[in-house]
Image: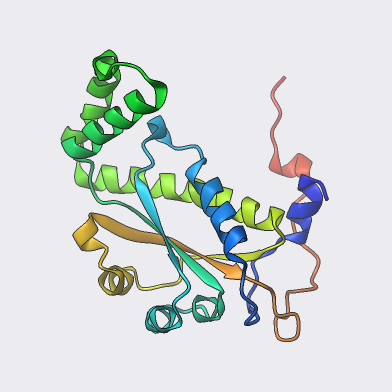
């Protein structure tokens, strides 16, 4: 199945079965997330992969979506609340080690990233959250490629999720969720519905 066929197959499953997604497939989706594009390659977010039923039930109480507890795995995208000198230093070390170059050769790059240290906290929070959304898009496509259903969700109590998952202590904030599982065609009214999209020539504006 090619990419367009796969994306036509994909939809945001409203209800899921109890079937579990194989760990190999979940790991492949997480690997795809790790390879997603992010600003300056900094990856200012983390992804919590939750399959524990008790934790999912606690989170369900702070969410409007049944997929939180019905999912095989719930991915919580949590972005940085700030960028610290330690974040930048660790990233420079990683770049130098990965590319086998002296860390000193990255001084100009490091100076540019250091601009985050003087930026307003709200700006950094918004920037980091946007990076998490880019990763979310990659995860959705990766899941569809494996014929795993997924549901992106914003309908949850962020503060409650942060408390349950101990995110504040990690310098993180929950921003968006992705439920992974398999569509329940018996009770999901949209499982067999045709995808509704505007015509491509209305969506796109071509300037030649």
In this rendering, position of residue 26 left or right of residue 39: right
Task: Indicate the position of residue 58 as horizontal and vertical percent values.
Answer: 37, 82
Q: Quadrant of residue 99?
A: top left
Q: Is residue 24 above or below residue 134?
A: below
Which corner quadrant of the image does residue 152 belong to? bottom right
Asked which quadrant contains residue 160, the reply is: bottom left
Vertical placement of residue 188 versus 162, above or below: below
| Total count of labels | 0
Q: Residue at x 37, y 20 (%)?
A: 100
Q: Position of residue 4 (x, y in %)?
A: 78, 47
Q: Residue at x 41, y 33 (%)?
A: 41
Q: Position of residue 140 (x, y in %)?
A: 60, 55
Query: At x 21% / y 45%, what residue is drawn?
Result: 121
Left or right: where 150 falls relative to 114:
right
Query: As rendered, which of 191 and 22 lies closer to the eye?
Result: 22
Question: Which quadrant would the C terminus be assigned to in this image?
Answer: top right
Residue situated in front as seen by the camera: 103 or 151: 103
Asked if residue 188 lies left or right of residue 60, the reply is right
Depth check: 102 or 111 in front?
A: 102
Say whether residue 153 is left or right of residue 114: right
Judging depth in this view, the residue of 106 and 99 nearest the camera is 99
Tell me what residue is drawn at x 63 percent, y 51 percent: 142
In the rendering, at what x and y percent does residue 84 appear? 19, 40
């Amino acid at each position: 199945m090619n990419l367009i066929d796969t994306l036509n197959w994909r939809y945001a499953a409203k209800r899921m079965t109890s079937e579990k997604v194989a760990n190999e497939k979940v790991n492949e989706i997480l690997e795809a997330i790790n390879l997603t594009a992010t600003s300056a390659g900094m990856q200012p977010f983390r992804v919590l992969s939750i399959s524990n039923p008790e934790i999912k039930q606690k989170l369900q109480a702070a969410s409007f979506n049944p997929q939180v507890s019905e999912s095989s795995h719930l991915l919580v995208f949590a972005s940085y609340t700030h960028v610290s000198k330690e974040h930048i230093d660790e990233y420079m070390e990683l770049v130098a080690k990965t590319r086998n170059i002296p860390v000193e050769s990255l001084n100009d790059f490091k100076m540019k990233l250091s601009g985050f240290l003087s930026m307003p906290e709200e700006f950094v929070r918004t920037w980091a959250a946007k990076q998490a959304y880019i990763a979310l898009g990659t995860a959705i496509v990766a899941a569809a490629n494996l014929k795993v259903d997924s549901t992106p969700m914003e309908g949850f109590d962020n503060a409650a999720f942060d408390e349950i998952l101990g995110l504040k202590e990690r310098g993180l904030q929950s921003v968006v969720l992705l439920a992974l599982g398999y569509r329940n065609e018996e009770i999901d009214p949209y499982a067999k519905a045709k995808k509704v999209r505007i015509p491509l020539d209305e969506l796109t504006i071509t300037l030649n």
